Amino acid sequence: MSKILVTGATGHLGAAVTNFLLQKTDASNISILVRDPAKAEGFKTKGVNIHVGDYDNSEALLKAFDGVDKLYLVSGLAHNRGEQHENVINAAKKAGVKQILYTSFQRKTEASDSPIGFIAESHLYTENVLKASGVIYTILQHGLYADIIPMFAGAHLLQSKAIYLPAGEGKTAFATREDFAETGANILLDETDKFDNQSIELAGSEAISWADIAAMISKVTGETISYVNPPVSEFVETLTKAGAPAEMAGLVAGFSQAIGQGEFEGTNGILENILRRKPATVEEYLKGVYGKA
Ligand SMILES: NC(=O)c1ccc[n+]([C@@H]2O[C@H](COP(=O)([O-])OP(=O)(O)OC[C@H]3O[C@@H](n4cnc5c(N)ncnc54)[C@H](OP(=O)(O)O)[C@@H]3O)[C@@H](O)[C@H]2O)c1
């Protein structure tokens, strides 16, 4: 049985991957890399091996990866994450890790002038470093998490009754973070070579627009929620005037524009195949978030 290490295991995705692994294999096969061991007490109690380390700390990474066969590398969030991921990949190669799964992003284009170019660049850099490393790679090109919908729709949606985003009629094949996590766990536990040196586009089975999402939330809550599609400049100005940090306004504007361009609209049956069941739908997810008890 392969020895598996999951990074980012005190974050949402890494924790979910680790929990799925715990359901499917013995805890003695599972290690996690965390920055703060206090946040990993629950996993420690379950028998998971805990390693403390940062993507910046090559020495700690090398120690953590000793004896590991498969690594699930959760992409970071820092401005220098491309270099951080490179550090992780170099340490994994040096330690003799046989396979690295990397959580990248779904896309239609790789144009540098894309509205999400600032996010894409470090993912593409990491993919190239990983492919050139000689370690077996499995690049998970994750679509957008359904879990970001409440954040994009706004914390006060039920008061404002409007989703305000410059995403036009663009459609997105959202899938839940839980389903991306279980897919990753299934790939980690697969002992064949069918996922070796593959880039796999993972997304939900159906692409929907923000107008569709507004209709779904209306159905779930019994309130009439509309979708408003402002010009990008107006959107950024409105958010900034409301006190949102410029970086956050730029991030949501960039993703909304990319959604408008259909960047995340691709559907295929791969997620469903690897899950060996239907993925959760956005409507099911929204019922869990907005449904009345
Ligand atoms: N597809 C999408 O819709 C989507 C949406 C959001 C994010 N993402 C990407 O997917 C990743 C996972 O999402 P998530 O929701 O699980 O995010 P999250 O909850 O913020 O988890 C990120 C994890 O990465 C760890 N991490 C970050 N920098 C690190 C470093 N330098 N060294 C070691 N560990 C580090 C964090 O450690 P700590 O626990 O110590 O903070 C955390 O556990 C994100 O980091 C982001 O790149 C994708």
Image: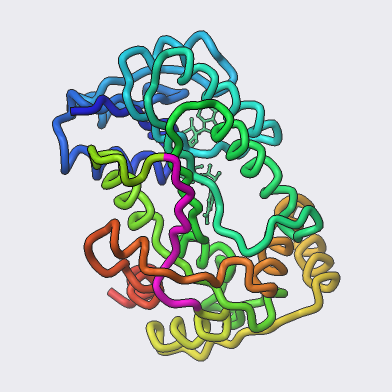
Query: From the viewer's perspective, is residue 225 above or below residue 166?
Result: below
Give coordinates of residue 56: x percent, y percent. Answer: 59, 19
Seen at 83% across and 73% down, the residue is 234
The image quadrant where one finds the N terminus is: top left
Quarter where residue 282 is shown: bottom left
In this orientation, which residue lies closer to the viewer: 265 or 199? 199
Query: From the viewer's perspective, is residue 65 above or below residue 271?
Result: above
Seen at 44% across and 84% down, the residue is 216
Quarter where residue 254 is shown: bottom right
Region in magenta: 197-207
How many numbered marks appear?
0
In this orientation, which residue lies closer to the viewer: 271 or 222? 271
Whether the magenta-drawn stretch holds residue 150 is answered as no
Q: Is residue 173 left or right of residue 9?
A: right
Q: Is residue 43 left or right of residue 121?
A: left
Quarter where residue 237 is shown: bottom right
Query: From the viewer's perspective, is residue 129 above or below residue 94?
Result: below
Give coordinates of residue 221: x percent, y percent. Answer: 40, 83
Q: Is residue 258 left or right of residue 231?
A: left
Whether the magenta-drawn stretch holds residue 203 is answered as yes
Seen at 27% across and 20% down, the residue is 49
Seen at 55% across and 35% down, the residue is 131
In this orientation, which residue lies closer to the viewer: 109 or 239? 109
Tell me which colouring the rendered structure shows: rainbow
The image quadrant where one finds the C terminus is: bottom left
Give coordinates of residue 143: x percent, y percent. Answer: 50, 60
Give coordinates of residue 222: x percent, y percent. Answer: 41, 89
